[in-house]
């Protein structure tokens, strides 16, 4: 876990600063948190890193179907809790659009 956090911190610091947009619309990053402990931790780490880079993360606690519907409608930017294959039915409609990126 420690190695994962260090890797995430390094990745955000290397690419995050260079990718930061000056546009005020890009300052806010909307996260979904479905209330699972592991997702709360990863979302919290991402929130702290983004704040350090000057972004304004906003975390919303939502149910899984609402989270995916909000991603599809662009009301959310990030969800760090995709559990496959159990969420295949929720993810499939979004993954077919060009609006989503699945990171491994």
Image (tube, rainbow, N blue to C red):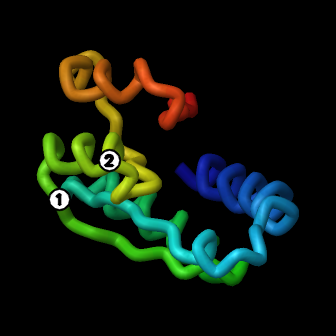
Q: Which mark is residue 73?
A: 2
Q: Is residue 58 left or right of residue 66?
A: right
Query: Which residue shows up at 31% across the image and 19% down it?
Result: 92
Q: Quadrant of residue 55?
A: bottom right
At numbered mark 1, what does the secondary structure look like: helix, strand or loop?
A: loop
Q: Is residue 55 left or right of residue 99?
A: right
Check contact, mark 2 vs mark 1: CB within 8 A.
no
Q: Quadrant of the C terminus?
A: top right
Helix or strand or loop: what does disc 2 sit on? loop
Residue sitting nearer the eye, 7 or 53: 53
What residue is at 32 percent from the left and 47 percent from the top? 73
The spot of residue 3 in percent (x, y) is 65, 49
Tally of numbered discs = 2
Q: Earlier in the sequence, mark 2 or mark 1?
A: 1
Circle on res. 62: 1
Location of residue 43 in the rendering, given as x and y in whole percent from the top left corner: 42, 62
At a point 29% along the width and 23% down the height, the residue shown is 93
Taking depth in this image into account, of 73 and 82 the one nearest to the observer is 73
- Label 2 or label 1, whichever lies nearer to me, is 2
- Residue 8 appears at what percent x and percent y? 66, 53
Which quadrant of the structure image shows residue 20? bottom right
Is 90 placed left or right of 75 in the picture? left
Check disc 2: other Cα within 10 Å, few if <14, some if 14-19, many if 20+: few
* Relative height, residue 22 to residue 1 (above, below): below
Above or below residue 9? Residue 55 is: below
| Gap between marks 2 and 1 measured at Cα | 15 Å
Q: Residue at x 49, y 75 (%)?
A: 57
């Amino acid at each position: 876990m420690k190695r994962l956090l260090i890797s995430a911190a390094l990745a955000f610091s290397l690419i995050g600063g260079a990718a930061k947009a000056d546009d005020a619309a890009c300052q806010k990053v909307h996260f979904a948190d479905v209330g699972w402990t592991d997702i709360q931790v990863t979302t919290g780490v991402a929130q702290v890193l983004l704040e350090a880079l000057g972004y304004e993360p906003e975390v919303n606690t939502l149910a899984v179907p609402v989270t995916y519907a909000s991603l599809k409608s662009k009301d959310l930017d990030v969800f760090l809790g995709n559990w496959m294959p159990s969420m295949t039915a929720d993810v499939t409609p979004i993954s077919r659009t060009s609006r989503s990126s699945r990171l491994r």
